[in-house]
Amino acid sequence: MTQMHIVDQQGAHLRVALTGRLDSAGVGHLEQQFNVTVGRADRPAIVDFAGVTFLSSMGIRLLVSAAKDLSRRGLKLVILAPQGLVRESITSAALHRIIPVADSDDAAMAMAIAMV
């Protein structure tokens, strides 16, 4: 089952962790919570992808929508630690050109607070 956990919402950035498949069913399960928590955040957001096992076009749409919502307010969304096929999906879709992708916590934090 696809899940979202809020890891940190008190610091300079919001950090959430996603687990499972970001396919049609997975996105349908968490889309509203993700949009409210991440898309409407009042600080940059880091989305930990270490536990994401599949990324479909529906998952990409979810991320792009939240990134655009944040960008309108001068904030960023950063993807942290995508693995294997998920990383390949990000690269194939050129999502990394729209949303920064980091391999470490330190890099993600630096990207999140960098100017938009």
Image (cartoon, grey):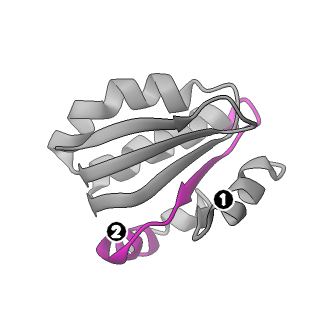
Query: Badge 2 local density, few (<14 within 10 Å), some, or many (20+)?
Result: many
Q: Is residue 90 magenta?
A: yes
Residue closest to the eye, 10 or 95: 10
Residue 105 appears left or right of 59: right
Residue 58 or residue 7, whichever sits in front:
7
Up-down: is 70 above or below 90? Answer: above
The magenta stretch spans which residues?
Answer: 71-91
Q: Amino acid at mark 2?
A: Val
Which residue bears the numbered disc 2? 86
Q: Earlier in the sequence, mark 1 or mark 2?
A: 2
- Seen from the viewer's position, the closer of residues 9 and 70 is 9
- Residue at 35% x, 24% y is 32
**Other residues around mark 1 within 10 Å, as few (<14) / some (14–19) / many (≥20):** many
Q: Is residue 112 left or right of residue 1?
A: right
* Amino acid of disc 1: Ala
Compared across the picture, whether 20 is left or right of 11 comes to left
Based on the picture, tell me whether residue 77 belongs to the magenta stretch: yes
Q: Which residue is mark 1?
A: 108
Residue occupying image coordinates x 29% and y 32%:
30
Q: Position of residue 110 (x, y in %)?
A: 77, 58
Image: 103 above or below 53: below
Q: Quadrant of residue 83?
A: bottom left
Q: Position of residue 74 (x, y in %)?
A: 77, 36
Q: Indicate the secondary structure of the residue bearing disc 2.
A: helix
Using the image, determine if residue 34 lies above or below residue 59: above
Residue at 38% x, 52% y is: 60
Give the x, y percent position of residue 99. Answer: 58, 56
